Amino acid sequence: EVQLVESGGGLVQPGGSLRLSCAASGFPFGRYSMNWVRQAPGQGPEWVSLIASGGGGTYYADSVKGRFTNSRDDAKNTLYLQMNVLKPEDTAVYYCAATYNTGYDYWGQGTQVTVSS
């Protein structure tokens, strides 16, 4: 059974930091590119970042570039998103999603991030 389980969300003040984790199981994690996608209330999904398999590079949406860092530990089948200098507009449910070729093959259940004073 494929599972992607996000954790690490919560309430943080503007300017603060959070580190999200996504634990993967049931598929060959190291062969998949991994994404972070977020959805704010009343809005559609927004792609945040991709980290390619096999050291192929890391990519970010302009809205988070320079503040977020996407990383992975293939030995632990775990994906991370370090989020710094958080803004209220970063408030959303954050999902990890696996990509083999194109699109999203597997999704997690999401973790809520709320940035508010």
Image: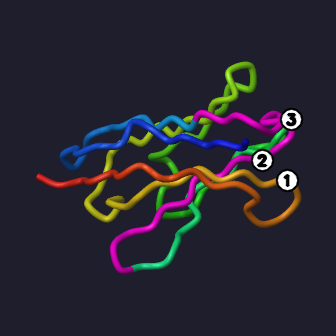
Question: Would you say 13 lies left or right of 111 here?
Answer: left
* Local secondary structure at mark 2: strand
Question: Given contact means CB atoms under 8 Å apart, are the residues at marks 2 and 1 in contact?
Answer: yes
- Marks 3 and 2, how far apart in space? 8 Å
Q: Name the residue: 82% across, 40% down.
A: 53
Q: CA distance from mark 3 to mark 1?
A: 12 Å
Give the farthest residue toward the left: 117
Relative image position of residue 113 (x, y in whole percent) = 33, 51
**Is residue 40 rendered magenta in the image?**
yes
**Disc 1 marks which amino acid?**
Tyr
Residue nearest the observer in this picture, 26 or 100 = 26
Residue identifier under label 1: 100
Name the quarter where the N terminus is drawn: top right
Say what secondary structure mark 3 lies in: helix
Q: Which residue is mark 2?
A: 33
Identify residue for label 3: 54
